[in-house]
Amino acid sequence: MSIRTKLIIILVAFIFIPVFVFGLMVLSNARNSLMTVRIAQLNNIADLKKDKLETFFREREADIRAAQYFYIIKLNLPLLDRRLHDRASLSHNKSHEDLDRQISEFQKSYGYLNVLLTNPEGVLLYSSDNAYEADYLGKPFPERKIYEEGKKDIYFSDVTKRQTTGRFGMIAAAPLKGFDGKFIGEMIIDIDMEPIYNFTSDPTGLGETGEVLIAKKEGDTALFLSPLRHDPEAALKRKSSFAEKAGFPAQQAVQGNNGSGVTTDYYGVEVMAAWRYIPSLRWGLVTKIDAPEAFAPVDRLRNIIVSIEIIILIAGALAAIVIAKGITRPVLALQKGTEIIGSGNLDYRVGTEAKDEVGHLSRLIDSMTQNLKRSQGEIFQRNQEISTLNEELKHHVLQLEAANTELEAFSYSVSHDLRAPLRSVAGFSQVLFEDYADKLNAEGRDSLERILTATHRMGRLIDDLLNLSRVSRAEMRREEVKLSELAGKIADMLRKTQPERQAEFNIAEGLVAQGDEHLLTVVLENLLGNAWKFTGKNPCAVIEFGVTQHEGKQAYFVKDNGVGFDMSYAGKMFSPFQRLHSVNEFPGTGIGLATVKRIINRHGGTVWIEAEEGKGTTAYFTL
């Protein structure tokens, strides 16, 4: 073999081999770094989805525990049971209407499909779904296992598909106790799975092929509970046997394992996945993305490196033919430069001023090095951005946990620390009134009636506190709200409560606003109700609802010619329990204006009151 040929081979080897090795190193490092970032991202999404699912069902449990102590249910459920076979009676209809008002608000606030009440034997006494009630009233609740579990404590059933509607849902059952602490029946709630499916199917952060799924263990298989991207009809139908390789993440999750890595999906494709077990629900959760999409940036980088290596190989061969004639110095310089770059110093430049092939080759190497350095810089920047997003996500999760903890503590205090002694006082007082009223003199009966009245007022106060808590955490749905129509309906309702009163309502026409219709209804009910109450001693009450301008914004107002108050006390009006009049003079709990303030704050507005003692009050609010 000639020296020229050997020199060409050597020169080509010196150029290509370091570049090839360097390319392999860059690809390997890039792949490992990208896999680390993707796995961390999937872990974070899985933890977030798991926490949100657990939070959803903790909130449902808290809602149900609060509902177990509803005064209206304790009072009316035994009445419905006693009059089950006399449903046309006025007392039965009155009890049913009272339950409708309480339960419809409860159902609407949390989006439940149906709320049922049974007697101690499981016979249906009430349903918020009129069609269901028409078919099953007076009949035993058909799901006896759920009913038996609900006698013990709050119980959540497995996910099922409704035969009538085709929708997926869960059943929650909880025992109900009367004022004397005895079992009086059960509350059974139909929970819609649609919000859970919408949340879990959200592919945010998972690219084009990403997916989130939930499953549960059934024998030696993983039963999928949610629709799948590659099988929309999979919910409660498709299973993955533990003996199969496909579906490994779901199999691990439902068996109580947490983890992540590169594995095989339920349809046999390689994926990156993170899996979590949710003990409270006995569910497994999986977040995943197809491996080809996850490694796409590395594949693009590989194509660039291969193209550059081919260019370098061709250029090196041409240069070697010329250099073989005796030009060795540029070859040595080029060799030195490639060795330095191959060692990892991407800041080194091997370009020469030579106009021949060696000089051109050296400049190509410099261009390749710059491209590689730029690619590494972009990867590092993306890693930093992902790290920052992860920290923000952890911060939001901590904030959410703190808020839920505070809310749970409040609900526990109201439900147990306040209601338990109140229930005892009310129960024993009722027993005395029913069994010994004829043995007491007029003064004794009057005192006993005062005790019952006070306990009932305390019950209403607790309900108002719970409503105040729900207002703060109820999900808002902004839409166009016709305020004038709402005010008119509330005015009609107030007139019916005291038809003998002489009262004039002046309601401006055509007033609309953007906000949550349910919450704004609560605002108007409180403000118009206050105006109605505090004009009760006026022989001719005048109540006005309209709009004016305040600091360039529309300010809605409710004005009355009632008793008014001293403005030096205005700062106390929107705090809970703050009252300027005695209960004997004007009834109430002192919670209404505090509720109004929270709702207006959630709408980004302000609320204030102007009044003059003996001349009336005007309440203003903006949105």
Image (cartoon, rainbow, N blue to C red):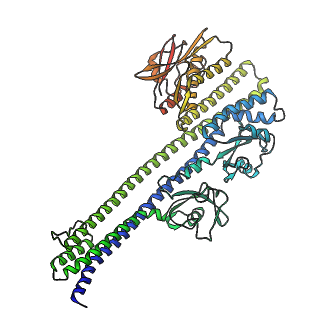
Residue 294 visible here: yes
Q: Is residue 64 left or right of residue 2?
A: right
* Viewer-proximal residue among 310 and 248: 310
The quarter holding residue 96 reads top right
Give the image quarter of residue 344: bottom left
Q: Percent x, y for residue 422?
A: 64, 33
Location of the N terminus (image quadrant): bottom left
Question: Residue 4, position in %: x, y?
Answer: 22, 86
> Relative to residue 303, is residue 54 drawn left or right?
right
Spot the residue most to the top.
539
Q: x%, y% of residue 111?
A: 62, 41
Count of marks placed on residues: 0
* Residue at 70 percent of width and 33 percent of height: 99
The residue lying at 23 percent from left, 90 percent from top is: 2
Task: Estimate the x, y position of residue 104 in percent, counting from the top left.
Answer: 66, 35
> Measured along the vertical axis of the image, is residue 66 above or below residue 515?
below
The vertical placement of 463 against 371, above or below, is above
Q: Is residue 621 left or right of residue 460?
A: left
Residue 182 visible (yes or no): no
Q: Tell which of 473 and 364 is nearer to you.
A: 364
Residue farthest to the bottom, as pictured: 1
- Image quadrant of residue 228? bottom right
